[in-house]
Amino acid sequence: MLEFRDVHFREIAPLRIKYLDSLPQFQELYIEWLVRAADYHIIFCDSKIAGYFIVNADKTLLEFYAEPEYISECDSIFQEISISYFDKVYCKSFDPVLLKCCLSRGCNYKIVGTLFRDRTHKEHIDYSGSAPIIASEEDIDLLVSHKDGLYESVAELHYMLTSGMIHMFFDGDVLVGCGYLIRIHENFVYHDIGMWVSTPYRNRGIATKIISYLKKLCDDNKYIPICGCSRDNIPSRKALERNGFISRYDLIEFSM
């Protein structure tokens, strides 16, 4: 008999390590940040832990993990939790169990993100402006003043500033762009890299140089750089590809 129990994040943490280790590629930052504000559920089969799943407030399934001995039953488990818990799924195309469950249901889908996990080369391009500066909380007013996509919310911006995740790039005294270097999970060395360029300075190759700087920073510190962007963000995709990043995977949105 199946039972689903709401739990605190710490109760699924060991199971999440198993899940992340089971994937052939590493977690997407976008999903990881959604996970932080979601609801967590442990799956019990005949009173034994069989796995877990995570659903956010929009009734979107973010993760679904079955212990190895229950993989053969994952379709039926997935079917049962879909009835009450979610009506949409974010599935990384390298997540074979979740992908199989969604395809077995014949769900409608669309590709919403492009995920980069491989590189063809490690050469880097020097940034010709002033040396980048790691942003601090003292820079909040400057960063908030930019309304062209530098941040999703002020709360998120504060978090990134207190964690030293933002590298500011200047041309003289003018902020022309920012690079984001974000450790995805504390137990792993994977870091997501991303960039923003101020509107007047776009289409000048600055995004490519910012990504190159972050890529080299990762290589120098033995981090593993990975990245992703929305499907329709062509400029970001091109900047990543110019730095040798290759996309073999997608983020897929399935509808029940």
Image: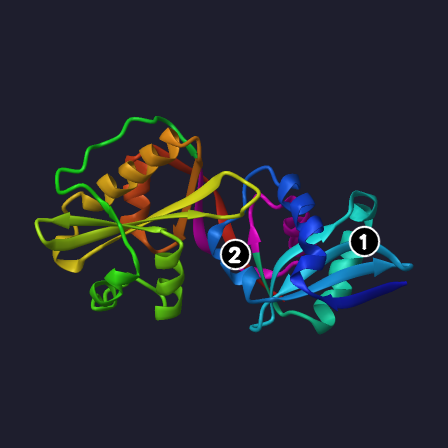
Q: Name the residue under label 2.
A: 31
Query: Compared to 76, does 236 lie above or below?
Result: above
Query: Compared to 221, does 82 lie above or below?
Result: below
Q: What residue type is labelled 2?
A: Ile
List x then y, in percent, for residue 111: 47, 55
- Residue 99 seen by the camera: yes
Q: Name the residue under label 1.
A: 50
List x then y, in percent, for residue 123: 29, 26
- Residue 105 seen by the camera: no
List x then y, in percent, for residue 15: 71, 50
Q: Tag 2's secondary structure?
A: helix
Residue at (69, 44) in percent of width and height: 18
* Nearer to me, 220 or 53: 220
Query: Compared to 52, does 238 lie above or below?
Result: above
Q: Which residue lies furthest to the front in this view?
A: 138
Q: Is residue 124 magenta?
A: no
Q: Which amino acid does label 1 sit on?
A: Ala
* Nearer to me, 43 or 223: 223
**In which image quadrant can residue 40 be found?**
bottom right
Residue at (47, 52) in percent of width and height: 29
Q: Earlier in the sequence, mark 1 or mark 2?
A: 2
**In which image quadrant can residue 226 be found?**
top left
List x then y, in percent, for residue 114: 43, 48
Magenta span of residues: 91-117
Residue at (32, 41) in percent of width and height: 240
Marks 1/2: CA–CA distance: 22 Å
Residue at (43, 30) in percent of width and height: 222
* Colour scheme shown: rainbow
* Nearer to me, 165 or 68: 165
Q: Is residue 93 magenta?
A: yes
Q: Do the residues labelled 1 and 2 touch (CB within 8 Å)?
A: no
Judge left or right: residue 100 versus residue 90. Answer: right
